[in-house]
Amino acid sequence: MSDTWTDERCDTLTRMWAEGYSATRIAKALECSRNSVIGKVTRLKLPPPAEKLPVIADREYVRQLPEVSLKKRRERERRYARARSERRKHCFDAKKEVRAQFIARGATTTSAAYRKHLPPLPEMSKGQLRAMLAQALENTAAL
């Protein structure tokens, strides 16, 4: 891959560009990147070719229909959610066993080691928290 633009390479670029070759095909012929070809065409201020040659594809590109990709994406999300729930279930089962072992050894339910293995508290919004505190206040006032 040559980084210098010699007179011969510039002549080849100018000739191929005028003949209608694509930047990709010119880059392959000159063994450089497509961006360097486009940059040199811009710097040389070459006019766009009158007629472009048909594009020859080296490989076949297959575009998936949006429904197919959406279907695959949803299936992948379901598999991920299923695997995540299995991991969580396994984790909670393991923590239940650990909690049972702590209780068997004589630990209290208020000890830090026991509380560390309790399931996490559910997420709640500020509104839900305020409603819960208001309910607790009413229950306390009723006593």
Image (cartoon, rainbow, N blue to C red):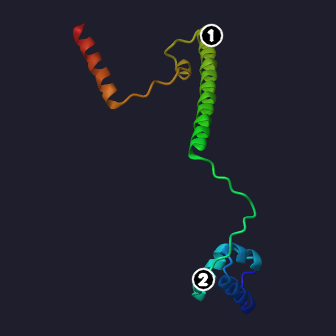
Q: Where is residue 141, by image quadrant?
A: top left
Q: Which of marks 1 and 2 is in front?
A: 2
Residue kind at label 2, given as amino acid type: Ala
In this rendered view, identify the residue nearer to me: 92 or 75: 75
Question: Which quadrant: the C terminus?
Answer: top left
Any part of residue 101 in sight: yes
The circle on residue 60 is: none
Is label 1 in a helix, a strand or a loop?
loop
At horizontal 60% and vertical 83% (from top left) the residue drawn is 50
* Residue 72, percent from left and from top: 62, 39
Q: Where is residue 34, by image quadrant?
A: bottom right
At horizontal 26% and vertical 20% (from top left) the residue drawn is 134
Left or right? Give the position of 128 relative to 90.
Answer: left
At horizontal 59% and vertical 20% (from top left) the residue drawn is 92
Left or right? Give the position of 89 relative to 6.
Answer: left
Determine whether 37 is above or below 59 in the image. Answer: below
Residue linked to disc 2? 50
In this rendered view, identify the residue nearer to me: 98 or 62: 62
Mark 2 Cα shell of 10 Å, populated few (<14), some (14-19), many (≥20)? few
Q: How far apart are marks 1 and 2 (CA)?
A: 88 Å
* Residue 67, percent from left and from top: 57, 42
Determine whether 36 is above or below 112 in the image. Answer: below
Mark 1 Cα shell of 10 Å, populated few (<14), some (14-19), many (≥20)? few
Which badge, 1 or 2, comes first in the chain's sequence? 2
Residue kind at label 1, given as amino acid type: Arg
Left or right? Give the position of 113 relative to 29.
Answer: left
Residue linked to disc 1? 105
Is label 2 in a helix, a strand or a loop?
loop
Any part of residue 1 in sight: no
Q: Residue furthest bottom?
A: 7
